[in-house]
Image (cartoon, helix red, strand yellow):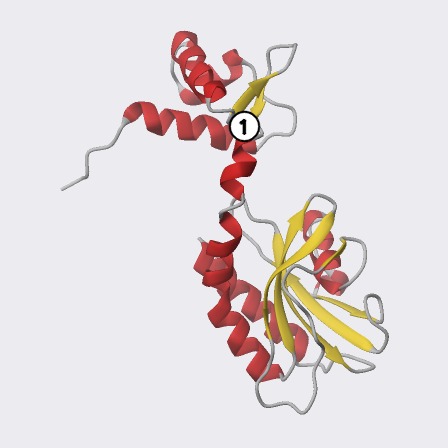
Amino acid sequence: MTAETSQTLDRGLRVLKLLADTDHGLTVTELSNKLGVNRTVVYRLLATLEQHALVRRDLGGRARVGLGVLRLGRQVHPLVREAALPALRSLAEDIGATAHLTLVDGTEALAVAVVEPTWTDYHVAYRAGFRHPLERGAAGKAILAARAGGADGELGYTLTHGELEAGASGAAAALVGVTGVEGSVGVVMLADAVPERVGPRVVDAAREVADALR
């Protein structure tokens, strides 16, 4: 038996998803066409969402996602971290290096989950909350490569050395196919170069995390 649902709530959520997928906002007419409802319904939906600061309209009348979404977004990191931890633990233990999940926060890469291996004599200290520019380090560069439609060497992962910490090498792969989440999974190790098997293993871990988040 199909559960009973709210048509109005469903339409409101569809409005937010449509707006989240565009950088330029949408007009009432465009939303009406995409939703398959008349303009009066769209006006009512936008007015309600505006009251909760989830939508804003610019001077030209185009609707965009509002700042109220950020308040909801603050609760996302703990949920994402919890979903990612099993894959990160497996990756850290398998490779013997510190594994991390990194998400985009503006123009920076933000480590939201970190797991250190339990059996190594030494490893890189890397803490949740660590930030760095997207243009530096494997985690950020993997995200930028995914935005551009690929990865270094088309291998699906990005390698760096000494960009965030002297003597440390990193490997990272972007999360792919997760709506509303832009990030990467990677490892950082004290080594002059990343062993050959690490890159593909990081890609597998990123795929596991992405599957857990869908």
Within-10-Å neighbours for mark 1: few <14, some 14–19, many 20+: many
Residue appearing at x 40%, y 7% in the figure: 40
Q: Position of residue 152 (x, y in %)?
A: 76, 62
In the picture, the quarter occupied by the N terminus is: top left
Q: Position of residue 53 (x, y in %)?
A: 52, 24
Badge 1 element: helix
Q: Residue furthest left?
A: 1
Front-lying residue, 185 or 38: 185
* Residue 22 visible from this viewpoint: yes
Q: Position of residue 157 (x, y in %)?
A: 69, 65
Residue appearing at x 60%, y 22% in the figure: 25
Q: Say if 82 sits above or below 180 in the image.
A: below
Q: Which residue is mark 1?
A: 19
Residue appearing at x 65%, y 63% in the figure: 173
Residue appearing at x 42%, y 18% in the figure: 48
Amino acid found under the numbered disc labelled 1:
Leu
Write down the quadrant of residue 143 in the picture.
bottom right
Write down the quadrant of residue 116 in the picture.
bottom right
Q: Residue furthest top?
A: 40
Left or right: residue 186 compared with residue 213: right
Front-lying residue, 48 or 150: 48
Left or right: residue 214 compared with residue 74: left
Q: Position of residue 102 (x, y in %)?
A: 63, 59
Q: How many marks?
A: 1
Q: Say if 177 sits above or below 211 in the image.
A: above
* Residue 156 visible from this viewpoint: no
Front-lying residue, 201 or 140: 140
